[in-house]
């Protein structure tokens, strides 16, 4: 059996060819994850070539996020949302419609991400569905992305019927034990079933993982890459672990940005036609992190301009100093990366 050491001397193109062919997959992925310096730059170049095959017009998708509520029925070990001491809020459905109309009219936005804490409460979900239907009726050219966690199949079906085009549901970890250690109030099997439901109901589906979760191994990352690439997803992602303030994982070490960027590059190489975001967590941990995400193959930019300012500090994810990129910053890094941003 070949070892990581026996494959490491191969150039990145040889490594990627092995990975795409499924030859010595685990060992090749591990070697690629550890690429640094010139080898990493070559890996990123291969990822950009794959992106160009999938998106020959070089267009980057720009989407606004509206964080519609910080009420979360989970209490994940890495995330600050849902803390019992945090003031809770829900943006009313009529306000969501007006925010969407403003972003459409004043910012030219055509893709909106409606995100909240994980919450399958019937009344809450019904309000979101009602708002989505009204938005699509008023703004038929807008793309809506839902991201409110595990729901029942019927709730997902109602969202799809209301006009929600896509849904983001991160698997976080393809290893069930690692997932349930990080999310002790959830089960991996339920999460997986939700992904199946979304795919069967005709959503454009996105999923992703966290690189650097406590207890995660390189073998886990190999499994994550295989899992995500085997689902034929429309959107894929990887974010770097940042321990949330006041969480169980608060004092755990942060994830490694370079490993995360390399994982993103491999995701792009195996998923040339999928949308992939460059996340704010990269910028939080490394200067120019989001630009490097684009250089590693990402092509989606999320602008934090939909959440009313009064609520922004109540949706921290990891802490109150969460990095929130603006439109000018994202357009600038996209231009530097050779991508085209719709005006």
Image (cartoon, grey):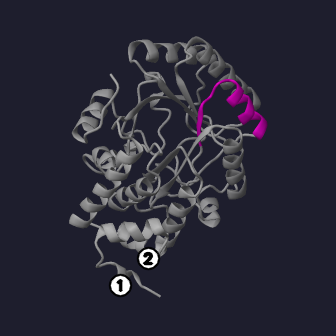
Residue 299 in the image, given as x and y percentages of width and height = 38, 41
In the displayed structure image, the side of residue 265 where residue 229 appears, left or right? right
Is residue 37 in sight in this rendering?
no
- Side of 153 where 288 appears, left or right: left
Front-most of 114 and 27?
Answer: 27
Q: Name the residue under label 2.
A: 27
- Residue furthest right in the image: 154
Q: Along the horizontal axis of the image, is 74 left or right of 103?
A: right
Residue 102 can be seen, yes or no: yes
Residues at marks 2 and 1 touching, judged by CB atoms closer than 8 Å: yes
Can you tell which quarter of the image residue 290 is in?
top left
Q: Is residue 305 above or below residue 8?
A: above
- Residue at 30 percent of width and 33 percent of height: 340
Q: Which secondary structure, mark 2? A: helix
Label 2: few (<14), some (14–19) or many (≥20) C-alpha neighbours in 10 Å:
many
Q: Say which quadrant the C terminus sits in.
A: top left
Q: Can residue 160 be found in the magenta stretch?
A: yes
Q: Nearer the viewer, residue 252 or 41?
A: 41
Report crowding for label 1: few under 14, some 14 to 19, many 20 or more residues within 10 A (C-alpha). Answer: few
Q: Label 1 belongs to which residue?
A: 6
User: What span is in magenta?
Assistant: 153-168
Residue found at x 50% / y 58%: 249
Judge by depth and name the residue closer to the eye, 216 or 57: 57
How far is mark 2 from mark 1, CA to CA? 9 Å
Residue visible at 68% across and 53% down in the picture: 192
């Amino acid at each position: 059996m070949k070892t990581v050491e026996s494959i490491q001397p191969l150039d990145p193109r040889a490594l990627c060819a092995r990975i795409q062919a499924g030859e010595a997959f685990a060992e090749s992925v591990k070697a690629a994850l550890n690429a640094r310096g010139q080898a990493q730059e070559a890996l990123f170049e291969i990822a950009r070539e794959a992106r160009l095959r999938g998106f020959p017009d070089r267009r980057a998708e720009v989407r606004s996020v509206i964080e519609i509520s910080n009420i979360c029925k989970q209490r994940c070990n890495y995330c600050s949302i849902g803390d019992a001491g945090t003031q809770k809020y829900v943006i009313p459905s009529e306000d969501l419609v007006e925010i969407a109309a403003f972003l459409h009219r004043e910012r030219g936005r055509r893709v909106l991400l409606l995100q909240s804490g994980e919450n399958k409460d019937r009344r809450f979900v019904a309000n979101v569905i009602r708002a989505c239907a009204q938005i699509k009726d008023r703004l038929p050219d807008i793309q809506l992305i839902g991201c409110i966690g595990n729901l029942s199949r019927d709730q997902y079906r109602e969202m799809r019927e209301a006009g929600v085009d896509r849904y983001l549901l991160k698997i976080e970890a393809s290893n069930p034990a690692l997932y349930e250690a990080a999310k002790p109030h959830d089960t991996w099997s339920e999460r997986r079933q939700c992904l199946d439901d979304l795919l069967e109901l005709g959503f454009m589906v996105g999923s992703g993982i966290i690189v650097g979760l406590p207890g995660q191994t390189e073998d886990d990352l190999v499994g994550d890459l295989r899992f995500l690439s085997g689902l034929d997803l429309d959107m894929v992602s990887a974010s770097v672990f940042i321990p949330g303030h006041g969480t169980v994982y608060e004092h755990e070490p942060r994830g490694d940005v370079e490993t995360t960027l390399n994982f993103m590059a491999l995701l792009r190489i195996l998923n040339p036609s999928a949308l992939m975001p460059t996340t704010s967590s990269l910028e939080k941990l490394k200067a120019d992190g989001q630009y490097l995400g684009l250089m590693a193959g990402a092509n989606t930019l999320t602008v934090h301009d939909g959440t009313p300012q009064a609520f922004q500090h109540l949706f921290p994810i990891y802490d109150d100093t969460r990095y929130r990129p603006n439109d000018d910053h994202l357009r600038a890094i996209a231009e530097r990366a050779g991508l085209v941003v719709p005006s």
